[in-house]
Image (cartoon, rainbow, N blue to C red):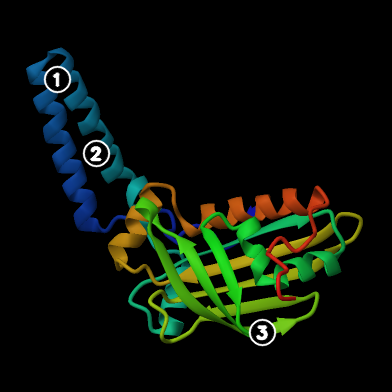
Amino acid sequence: MAFLSGKPEIGPTNLNEKERWMSGLGGGALVLAGLRRGGIVGVLAALAGGALVSRGLSGRCAVKARLAKTPHERQVAAERGWHSAAAAAQRVVIQRPIEDVYAFCRDFRNLSQFMQNVRRVDIEDDRHSHWIIEAPLGNTLEWDTIVTEDVPNTRIAWESTTESPVKHTGSLTFSDVVGLGTEVQAVIAYEPPAGEMGRIVAKLWGDSPGAQARDDLLRLKRFLEAGQDHVAASEDGD
């Protein structure tokens, strides 16, 4: 599996000149203070100062790089007029025929079988569905979704309706891999309900779209390769 949306484009450095000077001067002062103090506290202070000096000299900050938006996130936010976007793309190869994989994924009732946060999807018609999502602290989020593109055995794309409380878009693209099965590429994006801070907190705690998409696709792979290709949703009324 590969992370397709890439790392933030930060180049060889991601600190501006002022940040580098502040890191260098602050780190140098902390090193001197630590050496003068001595003891365990002094050693720790000197080490922290050394890290700041290194940050200033290299011009790179790992924390800032981790929190930076990816090009894909900036593009999605600009295209959709969102104040911010959390987005990711992942792919996986599943050892099943493309027809089987597409058919399983096209029935959105099956999403709860491999998408961890999806509790249930109620189908309204060929294009419209109602999603119920698991939220922190035992809460749920609900929104309506419309299919914007459906090319059999090739691609499915959807987005939340304008009335939905959560702005969300996603797609699954399917392609044959000779001798291996079907490659599924998932692209997801949403506007964090809590704003920019929501995206940052999610990434800090590892609950990022990239991690979610990766884990969901791995569950889909295990599920289908085990032969569990039945429609998991209740068939009452079908």
Circle 2/circle 3 CB separation < 8 Å:
no
Apparent side of residue 65 relative to residue 172 in the rendered image (left or right) = left
Can residue 48 be seen here? The reply is: yes
The part of the image, by quadrant, that contains residue 217 is bottom right
Q: Position of residue 212 (x, y in %)?
A: 53, 55
Measured in 3D between alpha carbons, the distance from the residue under mark 2 to the one under mark 3, in whole angstroms, is 49 Å
Q: From the image, tell me which residue sits under label 2.
A: 52
Residue at 20 percent across and 42 percent down: it is 24
Tell which circle, 3 or 1, labels the residue nearer the N-terminal end. 1
Query: Please, which residue is most extreme toward the front here?
Result: 237
Q: Outermost residue toward the top?
A: 39
Query: Is residue 61 in sight in this rendering?
Result: no
Label 1 and label 2: CA atoms lie apart by 15 Å
Label disc, if present, on residue 149 of the rendered structure: 3
Q: Nearer the viewer, residue 6 or 114?
A: 114
Q: Residues within 10 Å of mark 1 (few under 14, many from 20)?
A: some
Cβ–Cβ below 8 Å for labels 1 and 2? no
Element at badge 2? helix
Amino acid carrying label 1: it is Gly
How crowded pointer 3 is (Cα within 10 Å; few <14, some 14-19, many 20+) is rated as few
Mark on residue 42?
A: 1
Quadrant (top left/top right/bottom left/bottom right) for the C terminus: bottom right
Q: Residue 233: which numbered mark, if any?
A: none
3D distance between C-alphas at marks 3 and 1: 61 Å
Q: Choose top left, top right, bottom left or bottom right for residue 163.
A: bottom left
Secondary element under disc 3, as helix, strand or loop, is strand
Which residue does the image show at 86% across and 54% down from the upper left?
Answer: 180
Q: Disc 2 residue type?
A: Leu
Report which quarter residue 174 is drawn in. bottom right
